[in-house]
Amino acid sequence: MLDYTFDRQHIWHPYTSLTHPLPTYGIARAEGVHLYLEDGRPLVDGMSSWWACLHGYNVPELNAAATDQLGKMAHVMFGGITHEPAIELCRKLVALTPDGLDRVFLADSGSVAVEVALKMALQYWQSRGTPRRRFVALRQGYHGDTFGAMSVTDPEGSMHRLYRGFVAEHYFVPAPPVAFDAPWDQAAMMPLTQLLAQQHSEIAALILEPIVQGAGGMRFYHPEYLRQARALCDEYGILLIADEIATGFGRTGKLFACEWAGIRPDILCLGKALTGGYLTLSATLTTQAVMQQICDGEAGVLMHGPTFMANPLACAVANASLDLLLASPWQERVASIEAQLKRELTAYTDHPQVAAVRVLGAIGVVETKTPQDQARLQACLVAQGVWIRPFGRLIYLMPPFIIQPDELSLLTRAIGVALDTR
Ligand SMILES: *Cc1c(COP(=O)(O)O)cnc(C)c1O
């Protein structure tokens, strides 16, 4: 048995109290779409370990890539040194992402990718001789937990007031009000249009999660918002940073969510599913123009360089994960997950506990009217043989793309039972 007492007393879990900890579940191994509890009971995974494990777990191709790279080198510094896994990965990322994003900075987590994106924007304006120090972000957005990333994350959601005086203050506009498939309403652009008209001379960049606002509310918004946000940024010469750390690599039905609007950001952040969920790695891509401006500036360099930059092991697994994804019928898989989620989750739309149901790509969300008792709900879901991690009023699914229809039905049925037994 795992030492749950030690865990409870000494180890912090994400956003969890150590004095009133929620129960944790010991996972002994994982394979395919299943997590295995200590006693051997399988749980069908509905979370992809927070957007990351696209191919499921214990994936032979990814294991082989890791083992092969381990035999060569697990790590080597990236200062003054380069290596094949990094070159191959950056070549792939340049080819896959929207045209023109061809300069790549590799770092070690999503939050750091966002820090790098913010620094790129700040150095860009500094180098032009007209420093701009403010960002615009969307309410209900989430960009990570480090201070720069937190400063552009929804102030309520990330409790900015706890860190007053330390978190930089930026501008926030309301979350895009028009849903992904609702009729477009031009009034949606008013707040952003007005803010940029008034404050553009101090705004370095607009940062947003394209189409899907993830951790801040699991909301799907209209592609026209993204198209017009791009146009507004162009009008005022403001940079656009797209944080695709959650949406990247097929989750929304497009390889990158920006494709829904046919736009190219000036800076793109990738992470989470980049290594198929094996290792922590992120990438921040930008254009030749932004790169040139930064390198023409006072510092002459981008002021960042993490110890584990371009970790060869992570890059090798990322390469194998991208090969596996692109060789798979991922569009069909995501489309059939989407169709099934629409069928099976919309059945709960009229449930007395349910405020809304929404589905986009391989993401399904049931929003309840009142906050849930997380420990009770979690126990109810585990008892049914599924791993779904609700938070607040959201019970949501983003399963590995390899999930089979009967396994997906187990997930959606478990949500129904959980709603009934509240
Ligand atoms: C998870 C996430 C991050 C932060 O990534 P970490 O690897 O947890 O630091 C940033 N932006 C978005 C959109 C995310 O979903």
Image: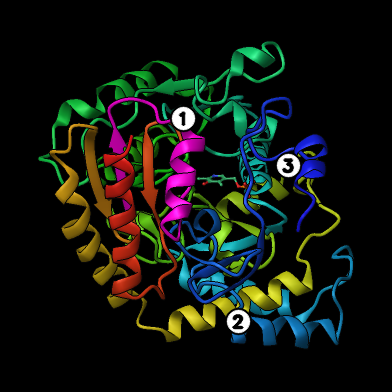
The first of marks 3 and 2 along the sequence is: 3
Checking the image for residue 137, the label placed there is 1
Q: Amino acid at mark 3?
A: Gly
Magenta part of the chain: 364-389
147 w.r.t. 345: above or below: above
The response on whether ligand 1 sits within 8 Å of label 2 is: no
Q: Amino acid at mark 1?
A: Ala
Q: In the image, is 24 to the left or to the right of 198? A: right
The structure residue drawn at horizontal position 86% and vertical position 55%, both measured from the top left corner, is: 307
Mark 2 lies on a secondary structure that is: helix
| Residue 412 image-quadrant placement | bottom left
Q: Which residue is mark 3?
A: 297
Mark 1 lies on a secondary structure that is: strand
Quadrant location of the N terminus?
A: bottom right
172 w.r.t. 340: above or below: above
State the separation of the CA atoms marked 3 and 2.
Answer: 37 Å
Residue 229 image offset from top left, x and y in percent? 33, 38
Q: Which residue is mark 2?
A: 320
Residue 389 image offset from top left, x and y in percent? 48, 47
The structure residue drawn at horizontal position 43% and vertical position 43%, both measured from the top left corner, is: 214
273 w.r.t. 312: above or below: above
